[in-house]
Amino acid sequence: MKIKLTISFLLCATCLLAQKPKLTKDGSLDNVDLFAMVQPVPTTHIFSDSVYNIWCGSVTRASNGKFYMFYSRWQKELGHEAWITHSEIALAKADKPEGPYQHLKVVLPARGSQFWDGTTTHNPAILQYKGKFYLYYMGSTGKSYVQPHTSYDNPNWWEYRNNQRIGVAVANDPEGDWQRFDTPILDVGSDSTAADALMVSNPAITVDKNGRFILVFKQVEKKTGVLRGGKVRFGVAFSTLPNSNFVKHNKPIFEVKDSENEWMVAEDPFIWHQKDVNYAIVRDVVGKFTGESGALALMVSTNGVDWQPSKHPKVLANKVYQVNGKTFDDKLERPCLYLENGIPKFLFGAMGFEKRKYSANVAVPLK
């Protein structure tokens, strides 16, 4: 018992002695070591539901001073992989950024398989711009029955997975009505050999100081006779409007040396713009950015196209500590960084529990 208590104390002490974030004179994060700011996670920072799996989690502060989390949810009894057939985007509210969050309502429910997003809404990314709220998300649809607790071995599951597209919903108030559209804002490429010919999903959005919207997205290429398609990569598209006219860049991003033969290199981007620099936090799938598979990495770009690991690329290890000194039994996915006046405060993310019998959103403190 004494040994366990000593280990827990040392872990917490190490976190408490972490360096303070040091912004450069222009307010950028170029020299900030986010990994050194990571603190253990208290149980009060876990947002879970007794009936639903919770995934994703995009947090914003409204003008009323309240914090809103847009998240994906689906019934636990259907199994983890039912996200692609039954996920819906919901809204929760809190008085503090770390919570506790209380569920308010479903924002984007199922609305019929005749719609491009008729059965599934997932991967929310919220953006406030000129008094409006723009909710970017993945939508999918399908008509085939998928047996619960099946996924990769079920051909019908891939119908929904490959029908993923990216859309946006708009509202004046997060608790009010949301306007949805009958077409996605980003569809697959018309060229069958394109890197995004099979599907697009996982939107991440920011707007730079010139009013240019930068939309980063997952893309999958087609591969004849293969249900899952070919390589999984990320692309980027630009627009001067928040809800239309996105023009894709012609090459994948987050590429690094010797990654050509990897099936997937990056995953789950969160992006933001700060002092003329674009930042992204991505999951380092095979360890190309941080040297640790499953860790989170910080990437930087001045133009939104050319991305490189930052000076301190590791944001979070593939193991996350609780305040009792134990690690959670899953890595953190779908990151969302909450900043106040340019200073990182909390790193939100989704995580499975009990070998993914259920999932929840976790807020990692940064100090």
Image (cartoon, rainbow, N blue to C red):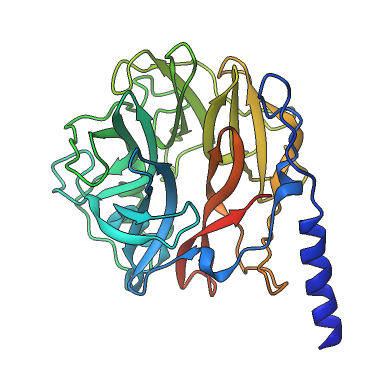
Q: Is residue 171 above or below residue 335?
A: above
**Which residue is pictured at 54% across the width and 19% down the height?**
251
Q: Horizontal and vertical percent for residue 337?
A: 55, 42
* Residue in the picture at 29% in, 47% down: 121
Compared with residue 133, is residue 105 higher up or lower down, i.e. above or below?
below
Q: Quadrant of the N terminus?
A: bottom right
- Say left or right for 363 vs 12: left
Q: Nearer the viewer, residue 220 or 63?
A: 63
Nearest the eye: 282 or 151: 282
Judge from the rendering whether residue 318 lies leftward or rightward of residue 54; answer left or right: right
Q: Considering only vertical position in the picture, is 217 above or below 10?
A: above
* Residue 151, image quadrant: bottom left
Whole-percent x, y for residue 171 in the image: 23, 35
> What is the number of callouts on the image?
0
163 over 90 or under it: above or below: above
Residue at 76% across / 47% down in the picture? 36
**Can see residue 264?**
no
Q: Is residue 346 left or right of residue 22?
A: left
